[in-house]
Amino acid sequence: AQSVTQPDIHITVSEGASLELRCNYSYGATPYLFWYVQSPGQGLQLLLKYFSGDTLVQGIKGFEAEFKRSQSSFNLRKPSVHWSDAAEYFCAVGNTGNQFYFGTGTSLTVIP
Amino acid sequence: KAGVTQTPRYLIKTRGQQVTLSCSPISGHRSVSWYQQTPGQGLQFLFEYFSETQRNKGNFPGRFSGRQFSNSRSEMNVSTLELGDSALYLCASSSAGTGYNEQFFGPGTRLTVL
């Protein structure tokens, strides 16, 4: 069965510090992987996606993620966090049948 | 292109009532998926419709149902509401049938059951 685990429920970082949000997935074949961000009262916005090819994926707002098949991970990173990055972040895995499975999310707080 | 729209944005109902939520996908998108989002549970997949047919279904009771119209607009219905149905209901649309798909989300409908 497919599943996604985001081990960190809540993370607090200082503005300007680096960020890494963890995501582990369970999927038998090559997964389609996504990171979404949700600001309060908003829907989900796609940050980046991995389908195949280069395992380091660049996204919007300065985010990147690295697919590591051996670790079944797809961690999201940003070298320098801005106050506007405070939000909830979701990792998701999809399959060719258009089914998507989401993690429970990581809430990010940015301290000035 | 206009994004995914959901109506209404907020709803307050009482236990035992039923409710219908609406979702209009991005023009040209034929797949619509519904999710329930609650604190601590993340997004739970309800069902997906493609070309008016339910193609995928999550693990929710039969009180949750949906349909899709020929213009790809979708509705979901929850009958005999329970307090635990209070949640943000998100709709997402995508273009292709299968394969590499990206979902675009609407702002959600916040349902409160009293």
Image (cartoon, rainbow, N blue to C red):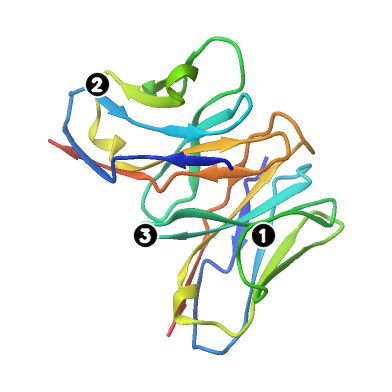
Between marks 2 and 1, how big is the CA–CA gap? 37 Å
Q: Position of residue B47 (x, y in %)?
A: 67, 57
Residue type marked 2: Ser
| Secondary structure under the numbered disc 2 in the rendered image | loop
| Secondary structure under the numbered disc 3 in the rendered image | loop
Taking the view exactly as shown, the residue that stands out farthest to the top is: A54
Disc 1 marks which residue? B23
Q: Is A52 left, or right, of A87 in this rendering?
A: right
Report which quarter residue B38 is drawn in. bottom left
The subunit letter for the residue under badge 2 reads A
Q: Is B107 left, or right, of A23 in this rendering?
A: right
Residue type marked 1: Cys
Disc 2 marks which residue? A80
Residue type marked 3: Pro
Q: Residue sitting at 37 percent across and 40 percent down?
A: A6
Instruction: For label 1, count other residues whose C-alpha is less than 10 Å away and answer few (under 14), some (14-19) or many (20+).
Output: many
| Secondary structure under the numbered disc 1 in the rendered image | strand
Q: Position of residue A64 (x, y in %)?
A: 41, 20
Q: Earlier in the sequence, mark 1 or mark 3?
A: 1
Give the number of the disc on residue B39.
Answer: 3
Q: Are marks 2 and 3 on the same chain?
A: no
Q: Position of residue B23 (x, y in %)?
A: 66, 59
Between marks 1 and 3, how big is the CA–CA gap? 22 Å
Instruction: For label 3, count other residues whose C-alpha is less than 10 Å away and answer few (under 14), some (14-19) or many (20+).
Output: few
Which of the image's four quarters has the C terminus of chain A? top left
Q: Position of residue B53 (x, y in %)?
A: 83, 56
